[in-house]
Amino acid sequence: MVDAVNTIFDANVRAVIPLVTAALVRRYGNLADCEDAVQEALLEASVSWPKSGAPRDPRAWLLTAARRRYIDAVRSDAARQAREERDAALELADSATTAQDDSLALLVLCCHPVLQPASRVALTLRAVCGLSTAQIAAAFYATEPTMAQRITRAKRSIDETGRSFGELTPALLDERAESVRAALYLMFNEGYAPSGGELAVHGELIAESIRLTRLLRIARARDAETTALLALMLLTDARTAARTDAAGLPVALPDQDRSLWDRAKLAEGRALAAQALRDAPASSLAIQAAIGAVHAAAPDADSTDWDQILGLYDVLVRVQPGPAAQLGRAVAVGMARGPLAGLAELTLLDGDERLARGHRLLSVRAGLLERAGALDEAECAYSEAGMKATNSAERRWLENQALRLRTEGK
């Protein structure tokens, strides 16, 4: 249901949805039913607010509506009358409870050990980050029906086996930190490169993922992996202002106006990346942060040290092999060794079904073909990539690239 109504609300309202879910789970404990109640409240708001105006405190309004929906659902279940009496007797959460930020606690709850790692991340992206099932499916290179079933099973599994929602003890954080980082990583990526929708960037998802990562780092101050994740986020987000043009279309990294890059975030990110690389030199996140730091150090695109970046990707694909790392390495090969070498690397990925579903492999191939002078093939690759792109801004950019080559070829 949230998939249908989330686009109605602005960034400030979307940001409080996970907090409302967390507050409801803290009071009642049933994750699946609590999230259903929040989605019912969102639907109610989507009908009521356009008529009467948005409330001054959307978080309190949604919490009140969600609590009412939850109690109504309990009342309708005759087998749960005892629980209904307890829940109905509870007073509305006071202002202190409403203002409490349980988002990190909810994130940790979603990373329950009863779940498989992929299910933990998927549930986190849904309950904490507010992503749609389609967005989560794209992040996992999975189909939407498969992902919907996985999320439903995950919620029920947590409710059936008990919950651990409250004090974030060091032991609990140690147990679930890896899953929490994985969820935050995918959350940030969905904000920085949305799999769907109209926008090239979702700033609220970026900001929320960075905020939660800072909270996790405060809670686990000596965790090199969390330090690396925060470094990677900051170094990447520092380029956000330069990533879109006046029409809202993406701007490729070589064409970005680097004067728009956020120098404060670059400085903090580079310092954190250096720290992470000292503390965890062989970790995937530390290597990715180091790659971001190399990009950040270049005053212009021509000054980028692609040999160093390629060397880091060589390590990355050994530490964490996968389509994203291999595709990034192919780009680095193409920049350091020439487009033909990059195209040769891409042939190794042609049989990967996960990449075949999306547009990124085709987009990278199109860019390499253009640099190699194969303009007709590049035009076709851009066009095919555009047809597969699920984000409207990215699709329009790819279509524009194909049109540009078609026009230049006449």
Image: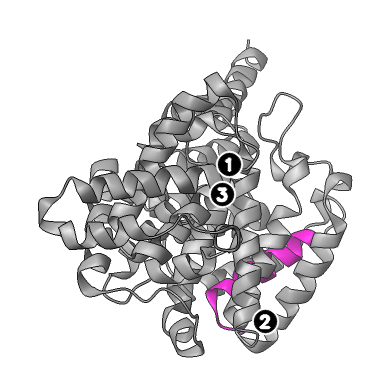
Mark 2 to mark 3 CA distance (whole Å): 34 Å
Q: Nearer the viewer, mark 1 or mark 2?
A: 1
In the image, the segment drawn in magenta is: 281-296
The residue to which callout 2 is attached is 277
The tag on residue 16 is 3
State how the image is colored: one colour
Residue 286 visible to an observer of this rendering: no
Q: Determine the secondary structure under disc 2.
A: helix
Q: Closer to the camera, 167 or 271? A: 167
Crowd around label 1: few <14 · some 14–19 · many ≥20 (10 Å) = some
Mark 1 to mark 2 CA distance (whole Å): 42 Å
Up-down relation of residue 118 to residue 203 (above or below): below
Amino acid type shown at disc 1: Pro
Q: Determine the secondary structure under disc 3.
A: helix
Q: Are marks 2 and 3 in contact (CB under 8 Å)?
A: no
Crowd around label 2: few <14 · some 14–19 · many ≥20 (10 Å) = many
